[in-house]
Image (cartoon, helix red, strand yellow):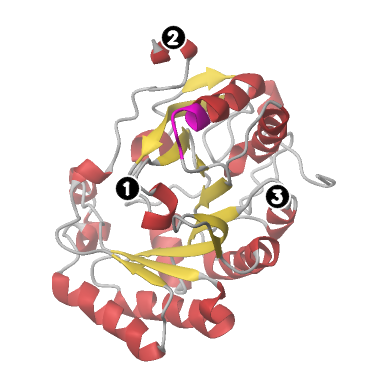
Amino acid sequence: MNWKGLSTSPCNLCPRECLADRKSGQRGYCLEDDRIYVARAALHMWEEPCISGEMGSGAVFFSGCNLRCVYCQNYEIAEGRKGKEISVYRLAEIFLELQDKGAANINLVTPDHYVMEIAEAVLQAKKMGLKLPIVYNGSGYEKEEVIQNLSGIVDIFLTDFKYMDTVLAEKYSKAPDYPLVAERALDEMVKIAGEPVFDEMGMMQKGVIVRHLLLPGHKKNARDVIRYVYEKYGDKVYISLMNQYTPFERLKENQEYRELCRKVTRREYEAVINYAIELGVKNAFVQEGETAKESFIPEFDGEGVFKEDLL
């Protein structure tokens, strides 16, 4: 790995380039210093079928986030409210413990601000017997130089592509550069992961899945994302169209976001699916039935973080 030019102090790991001195305890835009905080490490059944399978994905939920969208479904950890401090070595142990539980893969959820430590932990775990594919489960708001360093570390990129609309990116995530950043990051992900590869059980071993969470009232943004991804990459990537947006009470306190204070309608979601079909998309995941429930959001209770939690 070549981390030349990338640093946590001053921190320039993400496109925010907040330049926080995280090694000295200063918290960056991600709301974290350079200590690793994990809110949950457990088998997770709610990813795409080729990621969770029947046994579950070995999901490690990291605290903090460099994007912090106003509608965040995991806001408790994105805002750093939950999480226990662990070492790089303990993180490597967690990977192995998840493997022992039968996990289909190691799923790194919101890993961007700990990427250097995570890479070190993965290499340690591989020396200790880790055989599972590594899934990088991020927001899409990542520097291309950081993604380039994940060659040989990450096998599968499970990435969001939230916006093609810079106005929405600014309003909801304070990141007007999101579309351009996500385009460049995705390009590096496809270069690293290559064509999708599955095992005999249908579980992904290498590849890229691009997720888009449909927001209420924003079908055009969804169509623009789908069109960009499909026209550029075709069947090289899978597209996952999600309708599980959950409106939270906290949004009702701000009139600026009143359009987000409802669920996505069936008609909205079906219109987006039909658009993808008309475009020619074949490699896609869609959700059926009622999915906008808080049951899709796990308890960030520290499960699996410390060894005593396993007893």
User: From mark 1 to mark 2, how far is it between C-alphas?
Assistant: 26 Å
Quadrant in which the C terminus appears:
top left
State yes or no: discs 1 and 2 in contact (Cβ < 8 Å). Answer: no
28 or 227: nearer the viewer: 227
Q: Are marks 3 and 2 in contact (CB under 8 Å)?
A: no
Residue drawn at point x = 66 percent, y = 48 percent:
17
Query: In the image, which disc is placed on residue 150?
Result: 3
Along the polypeptide, which appears first: circle 1 or circle 2?
1
Answer whether residue 99 is magenta in the image. Answer: yes
Instruction: Identify which residue, 296 or 142, lies in the foreground.
Output: 296
Q: Which mark is residue 46?
A: 1
Q: What type is the residue that disc 2 sits on?
A: Glu
Q: Amino acid at mark 1?
A: Trp
- Residue 36's quadrant in the figure? top right
Q: Position of residue 114 (x, y in %)?
A: 62, 36
Q: Residue at x 75, y 50 (%)?
A: 149
- Numbered disc in front, either 3 or 2: 2
Considering only vertical position in the picture, is 272 above or below 245? below
Considering every residue shown, the one lying at the far bottom of the view is: 278
Q: Residue at x 80, y 44 (%)?
A: 3
In the drawing, does residue 292 fall left or right of residue 203?
left
If you read the primary sequence from the N terminus, does the residue marked by circle 1 or circle 3 appear first? Answer: 1
